[in-house]
Amino acid sequence: MGKKRTVGFSRFSEVQTAWLFMAPGLLLLALFTFWPIIFSLPLAFTNYSVIGETSFVGLDNFKRAFSDVDFIASIKNSLLYMIIVPFIQIISILMAILVNQKIAGIKFFRTAYYIPVVTSMVAVAIIWGWLMSSNGVLNYLLMSVGLLDEKINWLSDKDTALWALMFITLWKGLGYYMMIYLAGLQAVPTDCIEAAKIDGASNFQIIRKIILPLLKPYIFFCTLISLMAAIRVFDEVFVLTSGGPGNATLTSSVYIYQQGFEQFEFGYSSALGLIVSFIIMFFSIFIFVFNKKGGVNPY
């Protein structure tokens, strides 16, 4: 009897301790994530602008959104941004396989690849803004090997600006996904790989028939979060181009920010946010269904 009370009290204490540790994080999550979402729902049906009178406008904000040329352009750019998702996954997996080797100095390479992830976006913007300027190193290198005839200001040219931003996003995110895949690779049983090598399997066959199937949960997770990140990309676009030139790099998140915090049309901005949330939800459900049906079959 006494033993049962001790066990029960111990389990009760563990639960209380767990809630105690989670409480600060849950409080911040509720304050900065759930509360703004809940607050924006009714706001999307009003003309709230801080300084004027607020009134209920029904679906007017949504009707305006679908006839707003700038918003439609921002959605197109956000959807185009999803092109980097497969590239970032494939390159991250290859990098994870490379840094999973047991060779001298491998920790240096793991750290080096992860540095862009923790580097401030402002610092990244300054560096890449200089590299991609007309007189930057990128033009010099491409012209010296004959791949470019004349200088290009990559971030100011409407034909190259969005692709340049995609490349920066790809460069900055590779280390993050590489670490997730590296964790997955280290959970792969070495017995399977050794047995495959004894049977004469090549490195390519081992990757295709053993590693990729075992990494499937990680591929699903990374694809999902990178897809959502691509649609709502903000930092690099806002810091480097602010959506310009014209609307060439205007993404949905930047346009929502501009409507809310530059034009002070918070009601309209909330409606735009809801539309983008539904788009993200649509693609998320698609990935869940695709994964449930088997996903990419490596065989």
Image (cartoon, grey):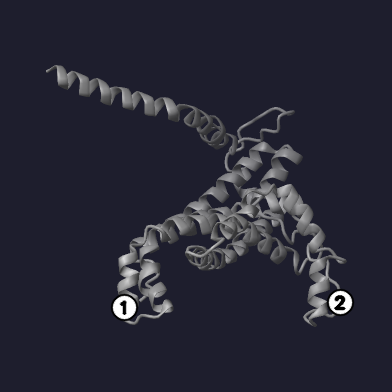
- Left/right placement of residue 136 relative to residue 198 reads right
User: Which image quarter: residue 107?
Assistant: bottom right
Q: Residues within 10 Å of mark 1 (few under 14, many from 20)?
A: few
What is the number of the mark on residue 150?
2
Q: Which percent across, then down, holds residue 70? A: 71, 55
What residue is at 48 percent from the left and 59 percent from the top? 223
Report the amino acid beneath label 2. Glu
Residue placed most toward the observer, 200 or 72: 200
What residue is at 31 percent from the left and 78 percent from the top? 198
- Left/right placement of residue 296 relative to residue 149 reads left
* Circle nearer the viewer, 2 or 1: 1
Work out whether 199 lies above or below 274.
Answer: below
Q: Residues within 10 Å of mark 2 (few under 14, many from 20)?
A: few
Instruction: Tell which residue pokes out farthest to the front in this image.
Output: 104
Q: Which percent across, then down, holds residue 18? A: 38, 29
Question: Would you name the residue on which mark 1 appears?
Answer: 198
- Left/right placement of residue 98 relative to residue 140 reads left
What residue is at 16 percent from the left and 22 percent from the top? 4
Report the amino acid beneath label 1. Ile
Q: CA distance from mark 2 to mark 1?
A: 54 Å
